[in-house]
Structures are given as structure tokens and as C-alpha cells.
Amino acid sequence: MRAHLGIDLGTSGLKALVLAGDGAVVAEAECAYDLDSPRAGWAEIDPAVWERALWDATAQLGDALAAVELRSVGLSGQMHAAVLVDVEVRPVRPAILWPDTRAVDVLDAWRALPDAALAALASPIVAGMTGPALRWVADHEPDTFGRAATVLGAKDLLRHRLVPVVATERSDACATLLWDVPAERWSAPALAAAQLPDAMLPPLVAPDAVVGVTDALARRSPGVTSGVPVAAGGADTPLALAAVRAIDGPDPAGVVNLGTGAQVLVPDVRADHVPPTGGHVYADTADGWYAMAALRNGGLALEWARTVLGRPWRDFIDAAAASPAGARGVTFHPFLGGERGGVASPTSTGAWTGLTPDCGPPELARAAIEGVVFAVAHVVAANVPPGPLRLGGGLGREPLVHTLLATITGRAVQRVELRSASAVGAALLGARAVGDRVTPRAALDDVSPLDGAPAAVVQAAYERWTDRLAAAER
């Protein structure tokens, strides 16, 4: 049986899967890891953790890989990462990741760009993106910055461990605040803002280009195909979007991915599209563009709330589901460490409000989940044209979450039964690179919204949430 290996390097874990030629996922593996936060607002990780996760996950898939003719490897990775490497492609410091806010003090260098150059970045100016993170390193760690030869994206470093090629591609490059989106090239004014020499930029290749063949998997797992072509790969969000849209069924007006963060995606926009809430316009992994309104605080905020309440995840979810809709008047603004996506400002903070003696941990848990869903629904209403939604991501699998989303948006919502849409998208990209046509097989489950009195209570809770948010943002 022919098959393709898809690898997704996420924020909190690496997922890998074997996608058969008929579109079925025949095996999956996952390795979780934690981010480091040596100071408040920092989010970084030693890239060696990613490498160990890669070999651990592929080892878990050893029997499945040995049972197929492995045709390709495709990679997906978290966007915005700043990975500085030396001439031997060894990291010179931990990678700085998208939740990181340390670079907030250098953002004025981007805001001062000429209007045309700023518009061409097609993205809000926020800390945590590659360019500002690099400028922070140049300012605060000049010796480290001086040892760096190249800056890579997360999946670019991982791909180098399979084939010794240093490169990136359009779907990651456009998410750096260093890329002129309409012109499809590096932005000279943004590079100057980052104080990044041209020599540190990696060469560009097409996402579906075969950049080499690897024997690394065969050396580690007997029976695995050797000399497997490796595609350049792409960013996790456009690959998830591609996978979700490739499933047979009506094409959605928008795709919502709920994981550590949340992304609201609108496919097939023009490069000069201006999102209503000032979101992003990014290159996909083919030759088009998509609009994205990204929220930092999805599962990230719920994990914080769960920790504060001292509940295991399942208990946290079950307590929220058992609590009455509207959480007895409690609202939760999940904007820990600020927000983007147009729903709140980068300086916003999180809060539970409306507390009374009737409220306890179940109500706080319910309000937390409602608050995250309400934030996503707010962004959907502002950015997605009329039509159905497809919903993916680990958080989207929770019945309380997808029922609330369908109720508040008033749209037809289909939940996509894929454990990792980004890993499937990576496998599809690898298949495309070697000329194989694969359509993923996955269920699309129609989500039933609440109706009658429960729907009215949830709608009232949403209106209360928006009113309190407006007051807090004044």
C-alpha cells in the first residue's frame, strides 16, 4: 500500500500520521512537550525538544511505516517562530514562539514604516512574530545574534534533520512581519526595522518542491522505505485549511480551528484583501492567499483557568457542561497577555466578572468556555461572509464548545473528524510533491445548535459578554 507521512510541529506537541493513498489515516502518534517561560511573557523552547519528539513519534509509527510503500514526507509547523542557527545549522539560542510578548517594546520600528510598506505586510503589528523577536535578540543579546548565520521557521529546522537543506517557503515567510505579501518577496523596510541582514535569510522554495530524499527514517526503523522524497512543507494554518477543504462536501465560507490559540480562516482572498478587523492576509501552500483572524487565547486561556481552579481537564469540562448556560451571570474575558484578531487589544487583560455568592468553580469553568467561544463567534461575525463553517482543532471536539459556537453564530457548523488537520495537510502536500492525488477520508458531523429557552439564555449571555467587553475596552 502506498502512503505518505505527515508531520506537524505544533506549539505544545508534535503529531505524525501515515496517510494511505485512499485518504485514510492508518496510524497516528503524538509527543507532547512544554514551553519554557524563564521570564513573565516569554515563550520559548530548545529545538532539541522538537528533534526528540520527531524521532519518538516516528518510532511509534515504525510498524505502520514498515508495512507501506512510503512515497513522501511532508512537514507542517507553527507559524511566527524565530529559530536562529549557526553555519552548522545548530540553534544558537532557544526558539522564540508566537505566544511570546517580550518584543512589545520594539514594535514602534514597524509602526514607523512608510504607509505603503506597512500595508504590504498585510498583518497587525504584534509581538511574538518573527521580525520583532529577531530585533529583540539583536538589541538584547548582540553576541548571540552575531553567532547566527540564518533564521529559520520551526518546520524548516525539523526538515533539515531529514534532509540537509536550508530553506523556507511562502506560507511561513509571509507570517514573519518581514514579507511583502502582494509583491511576494522580502520587505526591505521591514528587514531594516528588524536589523536583519539579507545574508541571514534562507533561500525560498515552493512548498510542494521535493528538496531531497531521506534515509533517516529507514536508519532508525528497519523495514521503512529508504530514499523517501521530502517536500519543503508549509505553515500549520494553511495546511490545516487545505486538509479541511479537501474533504468531500460543500466548500465552507470559513474554517475555524480551535487549539492552543484560535484561527478564523477565509479562503481564496486577494493579496490586497483588507480584513474587516485588521487581521492577516497570508500566502497558502499553493499559489493563492487566505485571510486569518487569529486569537492568542483559545485553549491557552482554558488551560490557565483549569489550573487556577485546580481541576483535571476532563473534570473542568464536565463541571462546565453541568453548570447552567450563562454561568449564573459570570462572564470571562480570556485575553491573558493581550489579544489580537480585532476582538480585543494587545494590552487587554483577562477577567472573570459578575461574581456573586451563588457562583462556584463550575460557574467559573462554564464562563471560561463560554468566553473563549464568544470571542471566536465575535471574530466570525466580523470576518466571515455568509455561509457554513467547518470546525477543527482539539478544543472543537468538545460538545459544549461546538454546540455553543453553532448557537451563537447561527450558521451551519460541520465538525471535522481529524485528529490533526495540519498533519493531514502536510501528508497531502507531500503527496502533491510526488504527483499523487489523495483525497482525505474524514467524517463531517453536523453540529446541532441549542434552540428555544436554552438558546435564548446563551444569546443573552453573549450580549452580556460583549457589553462588559466594550466597557472594559474603553
Image (cartoon, helix red, strand yellow):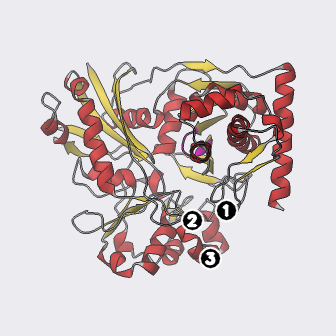
Mark 2 or 3, nearer chain start:
3
Residue 410 visible (yes or no): no
Q: Which mark is residue 108?
A: 3
Q: Amino acid at mark 2?
A: Ala
Q: Earlier in the sequence, mark 1 or mark 3?
A: 3
Magenta stretch: residue 228 in it?
no
Find the distance from the CA under tag 2 to the CA under tag 1.
Answer: 9 Å
Between circles 1 and 3, the one closer to the viewer is 1
Quarter containing the C terminus: bottom right
Which residue range is magenta in the image?
A: 258-264
Identify which amino acid the numbered label 1 is placed on.
Pro
- From the top left corner, tell me how far across and down residue 1 is, in percent: 25, 18
Which quadrant would residue 58 be assigned to in this image?
top left
Q: Is residue 288 above or below residue 470?
A: above
Which percent across, then down, holds residue 379?
Answer: 72, 45
Q: Is residue 31 above or below residue 449?
A: below
Q: Residue at x 39, y 76 (%)?
A: 197
Question: Dots 2 and 1: beta carbons under 8 Å?
Answer: yes
